[in-house]
């Protein structure tokens, strides 16, 4: 018997395509439902479970052993549970790391999400790769197609950003430039990256009005990462465009996708998403390839992109999809990947520094 499996509770992941995967249930004894996605990182599970971009998703890890270095107090990306549920092959119950405080099982109990362990995660991944958007339910019994269809319908009606964006503004003191982050489900490490560069940072709820943001006298604006379909935010894009045109702006992941919407473009679903720590992207101006941390289902659609104003700066090496945009005349830039990394390589951390340089130099000159 697998020494990692000590739970007596059998659990099931039922996919909308009809397959049922049986395993052992750990973490919080809750039924979870959502889009089933796969993450290929060998590490980073603590950041993934707490990254608000994963809100409403059941995340399957392709790396076979998860939980082996435990969970610590400092690597959380938010204080709320983000994922809906987790599926792993082997769940390690005896973690070993000098920073570890509790096991992943204990953290899942505290955070409030279930873990299904002991299942063939490669087979689930193959199904997701073949099936595109695939909903599932993780529960203590298999579900019927009708039950899943009902959950799916409810899920599709929800605007996920509403559940993860802060409800009140908060300012973090720094001596440097004042950056206002539009919180679409901001990862804590984006805040950390800005604070590390000396910025004063104000994080505002995503529905904050333009006048309120102007009153904060920002030097620059960041549109954060976040969950769900970017098209759900289209109605805010007119006012966000005004904001982006008024201040040096950086968009990260969901923030990048909405930048294309602001300029009349569209987004589309990738066949099965990019989630992992080793997605290669090419910087078109230099031909340099960077390894990046990624986590997205949607992508900026090439067709319909406002090429009068925006140019593509990065492309995914595997599928050629758009990974970065820059405004031709204004200091506005965005990336589909995560320059703040965490988890994953920090090869592209210079992007946040470059944004800050534009805030300090081009921004001041441009708007003088
Ligand atoms: N990490 C993110 O910001 C994700 C963006 C968007 N929700 C997507 O899945 O494509």
Image (spheres, rainbow, N blue to C red):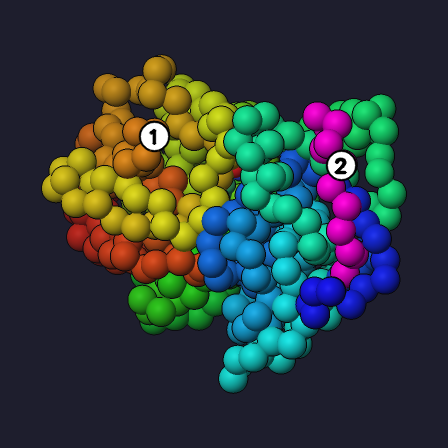
Left or right: residue 115 compared with residue 92: right
Chief secondary structure of the magenta portion: strand
Residue at the image position 12 percent from the left and 42 percent from the top: 286
Determine the secondary structure under disc 2: strand
Residue at the image position 21 percent from the left and 45 percent from the top: 289
Left or right: residue 221 compared with residue 234: left
Work out which residue is located at the far bottom of the displayed protein and give it.
98
Left or right: residue 325 compared with residue 298: left
Per the image, is 24 magenta?
Answer: yes
Q: Quadrant of the N terminus?
A: bottom right
Q: Is residue 31 above or below residue 67?
A: above
Left or right: residue 121 compared with residue 34: left
Q: Which mark is residue 290?
A: none
Residue under label 1, please give it: 319
Q: Quadrant of the C terminus?
A: top left
The Cα atoms of the two marked residues, 2 and 1, are separated by 30 Å
Q: Position of residue 225 (x, y in %)?
A: 48, 46
Residue under label 2, please give it: 20
**Residues packed near mark 2 inside 10 Å, few (<14), some (14 to 19) or many (20 plus):** some
Residue 233 visible? The answer is: no
Determine the secondary structure under disc 1: loop
Per the image, is 182 magenta?
Answer: no
User: What range is drawn magenta here?
Assistant: 14-26
Marks 2 and 1: which is nearer the front? 2
Residue at the image position 36 percent from the left and 37 percent from the top: 244
Out of 291 and 213, give the one closest to the viewer.
291
Q: Position of residue 203 (x, y in %)?
A: 51, 55
Q: Is residue 173 above or below residue 216?
A: below
Q: Is residue 322 above or below residue 101?
A: above
Q: Position of residue 285 (x, y in %)?
A: 14, 38
């Amino acid at each position: 018997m697998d020494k990692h499996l000590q739970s007596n509770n059998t659990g099931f992941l039922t996919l909308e395509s009809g397959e049922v995967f049986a395993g052992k249930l750990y973490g919080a004894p809750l039924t979870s439902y959502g889009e089933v996605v796969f993450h290929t990182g060998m590490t980073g599970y603590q950041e993934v479970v707490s990254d608000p971009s994963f809100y409403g998703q059941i995340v399957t890890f392709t790396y076979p052993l998860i939980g082996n270095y435990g969970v610590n107090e400092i690597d959380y990306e938010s204080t709320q549970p983000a994922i809906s549920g987790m599926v792993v092959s082997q769940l390690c119950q005896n973690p070993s790391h000098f920073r570890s405080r509790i096991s992943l099982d204990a953290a899942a109990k505290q955070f409030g999400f279930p873990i299904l362990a002991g299942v063939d995660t490669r087979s689930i991944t193959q199904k997701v790769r073949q099936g595109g958007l695939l909903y599932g339910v993780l529960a203590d019994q298999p579900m019927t197609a009708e039950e899943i269809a009902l959950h799916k319908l409810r899920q599709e009606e929800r605007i996920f950003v509403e559940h993860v964006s802060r409800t009140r503004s908060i300012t973090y003191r720094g001596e440097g430039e004042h950056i206002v982050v539009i919180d679409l489900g901001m990862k804590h490490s984006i805040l950390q990256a800005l604070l590390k560069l000396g910025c004063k940072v104000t994080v505002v709820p995503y529905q904050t009005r333009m006048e309120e943001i102007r009153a904060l006298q920002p030097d620059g604006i960041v549109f954060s990462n976040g969950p769900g379909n970017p098209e759900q935010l289209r109605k805010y894009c007119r006012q966000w465009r005004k904001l982006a045109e008024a201040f040096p702006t950086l968009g990260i992941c969901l923030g990048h996708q909405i930048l294309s919407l602001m300029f009349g473009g569209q987004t589309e679903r990738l066949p099965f998403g990019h989630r992992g720590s080793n997605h290669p992207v090419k910087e078109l101006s230099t031909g340099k390839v960077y390894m990046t941390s990624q986590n997205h289902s949607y992508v900026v659609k090439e067709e319909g992109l406002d090429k009068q104003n925006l140019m593509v700066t990065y492309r995914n090496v595997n599928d050629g999809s758009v990974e970065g945009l820059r405004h031709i005349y204004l200091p506005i830039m965005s990336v589909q990947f995560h320059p703040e990394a965490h988890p994953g390589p920090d090869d592209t951390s210079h992007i946040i520094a470059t944004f800050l340089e534009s805030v300090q130099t081009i921004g001041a000159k441009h708007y003088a």
